Image (cartoon, rainbow, N blue to C red):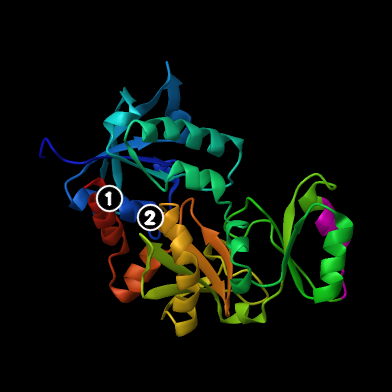
Amino acid sequence: MSQNAIKLGVVMDPISDLAYKKDTTLALLWAAKAKGWTLYYLEQEDLYLYEGRAMGSVRALEVHQDASHWFDLGEREAMPLAELDVILMRKDPPVDEHFLNAVHLLGFAEREGTLVVNPTRALLECNEKLFAQQFAHCIPATVVSCNAAVLRAFQAEHGDTIFKPLDGMGGSGIFHIGPDGRNLGSVIEQLTERGQRQIMAQRYLPEIKEGDTRILLVDGEPIPFGLARIPSAGETRGNLAAGGRGVSRALTDRDYWLVEQVKPMIREKGLMFVGLDVIGDSITEINVTSPTCVREIDDQRGTDIAGKLMAAIESRLG
């Protein structure tokens, strides 16, 4: 391998636990390997700060396209993170205290010149549920509150309503309350932790039956095919983790219009890899922590989304 090979670190959930057939982080690592880059593996707990420098207890990583043996890890070594050219922050939500502390530590490496994807400032600023609220003309009717009276009034106004936590992923903690309001009190009580925690209520979009479409943006530009996550029978959640079925579809004129609305801010914040969630004509979330669905789109459309991202990273490194 070239002495000048780009050094890429990845902060992720345990690699032994990932779903080999569909994991996006694995696709990103394969694409980096294809470019001859040197890979280093970190879990969130391997990050630390020593005398003001971001450090990592890193392990050299080899990845393979083999369902029975997809990685090899080297021995641990202490490394200043600034020795890495780029770090992919791919730890899945929840965006809790541990996640935010890890992002702060990565910020120290960033200030020494390491490229973090996505940038730490954006990860700290862009809550995936709240970020989309800046584009009020692109989203369904929404309220964010921990106040039961406010949440009840919103449900009374809109009837069918979705309630969800602000820090979940994969459809966890999402409730659909019908016009009769049955179980509304217990849902609000549980999600808000008795009025202590802000949650989101959103007008239910019946178009969810046709799928919740993930649209991926690489360096601000949309991949021309999205992945419609279609709920299983009796479900209101299209998330693949909740049993949804993923069907790739070409982006519509409306999808491209929605992308154009958010693109300037995504570019301004330096976000290199973003997933918009679109139901019908509306954006419901803007995912910036660890967007997924690369493998499903690539498999169905023959695209190379991870390769596009690595090329964009290479260009950014200059």
Main SS, magenta region, reads helix
Q: Is residue 13 visible?
A: no
- The part of the image, by quadrant, that contains residue 216 is bottom left
245 in magenta: no
Residue 85 x, y percent position in the rendering: 27, 38
Q: Where residue 316 is drawn, which disc sits there?
A: 1
Residue visible at 57% across and 55% down?
128
Q: Which residues are magenta?
A: 180-189
Task: Indicate which disc, 2 or 1, sits on the residue closer to the N terminus.
Answer: 2
Relative to 55, 188 lies left or right: right
Secondary structure of the residue carrying numbered label 1:
helix
Secondary structure of the residue carrying numbered label 2:
loop
Instruction: Say which of 168 and 145 sits in front.
Output: 145
Q: Is residue 47 above or below residue 244?
A: above
Residue visible at 16% across and 46% down?
36
Relative to 263, 96 lies left or right: right
Q: Where residue 272 is drawn, which disc sits there?
A: 2
Q: Residues within 10 Å of mark 1 (few under 14, many from 20)?
A: few
